[in-house]
Image: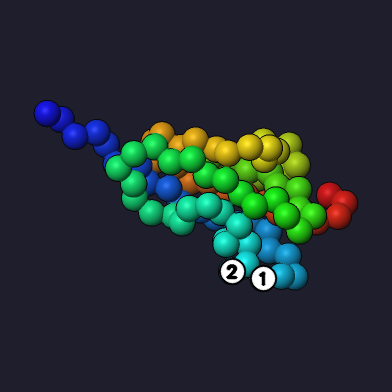
Amino acid sequence: MIKSALIFVSLLIAYVSSIGQESLYEKFSIQGGVYETAQKIKIDTSGGYTIYYNLDGSKPSSGAAKYKSEITIEKPTVVRAVFYKGGI
């Protein structure tokens, strides 16, 4: 039996608000790492943030995908998110 490929997930935050980078990483439902199965990532949207993300490692802007619901990761992926508070 062939074992399926491992899933590598890297989480990067492109914008850090005044609450600090560590607090924003805690808003992700999983930590970056290597997983044997597909992962579903949820981002805690409390705190008045608007969140945009990319799955290709590039820095997201307001033109990137806006986070609305969990993100399914099925292959090695760099998730990069921007947390905006207030106007963009």
Q: Is residue 41 above or below residue 49?
A: above
Mark 1, secondary structure of its residue:
loop
Q: Which residue is mark 1?
A: 20
| Color encoding of the figure | rainbow
For the residue carrying disc 1, how many other residues have a C-alpha within 10 Å: few (<14), some (14-19), or many (20+)? few
Residue wearing tag 2: 22
Residue type at tag 1: Gly
Q: Position of residue 86 (x, y in %)?
A: 86, 55
Closer to the camera in the image, 31 or 57: 31
Residue 64 visible from this viewpoint: no
Farthest residue toward the right? Answer: 87
Which residue is drawn at the image coordinates 46% and 37% (left, top)? 73
Where does residue 71 sit, x and y in percent of width and height?
55, 38
Q: Is residue 6 left or right of residue 58?
A: left
Q: Secondary structure at mark 2?
A: helix
- Residue at 65% from the left image edge and 52% from the top image edge: 44
Q: Amino acid at mark 2?
A: Glu
